[in-house]
Amino acid sequence: MKQIFSLFLLLFLFPVWLQAQFRISDQAQISILTSSPSDDEVFTIYGHTGIRLKDPAHDMDYVFNYGLFDFSKPNFIFRFAKGETDYTLGGSNFLDYIIDYQLRGSSVTEQVLNLNPGEKQRIVEALLINMRPENRTYRYNFFFDNCATRPVAIVETYVDGEVLYNHPYRPKTFREMIHACSRNKPWLTFGCDLALGSPTDRLATQHEEMFLPQYLQEAFDQATIMEPDGTVRKLVAETHLLAEEISDEETETEWLTPLRCGWLLFLVILGITYREWKKKACYRWLDCLLFFIAGLAGTVITFLCFISEHPATCPNWLLLWLHPFHLAGAIIFAVKKWKKAGYSYHFINFAALTLMLLGWYFIPQHLPAACIPLVGTLWLRSAYGVYRYKSDFA
């Protein structure tokens, strides 16, 4: 609510400044604020970046924030999955911004930029133009257009010269970087691994790594500006720790991880299948349930892969085992007189999953270990389905 109030306050004030051709004073400072990750919400585990404008001569101390969004907008979840999430540039009073992150337990680090008056003025003017109603909303992209990449682009565009990044480059894939952020949330990590395809496994360039605030902070810390005349100056003049991180040392380790749940499911299905074999029975309901759930999950992955605008969801090699055709399989298994069609489906699925398991480490995409028992569960049911038909008690 504080952010919304501050946003409306700034939207009221900024047009007045623009009409008056607002100019900052020589005392003005522009800073990058980096907030450390917190486990409060899914969207806070990656940290945050803001731009601070402090001008004592005008009694001004505001933070520009490219990370505002509204959960209450119609069809928010659908639009997010489709890659049509709109974020908004807003702002807040500096003290409100700091208090908000202190309550989350996040640290806030300020990097005061080493800019000349002309550069500061151009950056402020660009921010004010972006704050206009027709400009303040933008199409968010997690990797390539977010709260961290936008400040980087503004700084690079409006400094006199070229920003050179001198920090050591330690190649990492996009997936490795987000895994580091979600390491305390195994189910979130698993969900991201299901949704994100093979493009997430390519190495990010040194510049692309700055989609995460912590990498932006590190890059700016050692960056320099090479001016047209060859003069070189540091990008950051000063660094201050404005709020210290408060860590929760009593964080409980989650026991029911996706991997453990996957193996538990496999063992349960193995036990049921063994009972089924001993009784020469046919539990159609079990195949219908398992393949229906797999088909629903495959439908979501297919949507993300072929309909969503997210650039990192296609191709997704998980479609080799988790696909919408399982919905058709579930329907086939439910009709007793279609047992020959059910046998054919089980045979094809058994062969496909066998090849997938044998070639697991050759697939050009990171596949979460928790998928192994899940693939094994469908493989087991298809293997038994083939055996059932051949033994003539399907």
Image (spheres, rainbow, N blue to C red):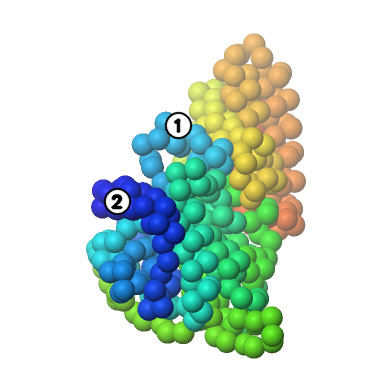
How far is the residue under mark 1 from the one under mark 2?
27 Å
Residue at point 41% right, 69% down? 24
Q: Earlier in the sequence, mark 1 or mark 2?
A: 2
Residue designated by label 2? 9
Task: Describe the element under mark 1 as helix, strand or loop.
Answer: loop
Name which residue type carries label 1.
Asn
Where residue 238 sits in the image (x, y, percent)? 42, 84
Near mark 2 (Cα within 10 A), the count class, few <14, some 14-19 or many ≥20, is: some
Left or right of 143 in this view: 26: left
Residue designated by label 1? 75
Nearer to us of marks 1 and 2 is 2
Where residue 15 sits in the image (x, y, percent)? 39, 50
Task: Describe the element under mark 2 as helix, strand or loop.
Answer: helix
Residue 295 got which mark?
none
For this rendering, which residue is in front, 127 or 306?
Answer: 127
The image quarter in which residue 165 lies:
bottom right
Q: Residue 173, can we see it?
A: yes
Name which residue type carries label 2.
Leu
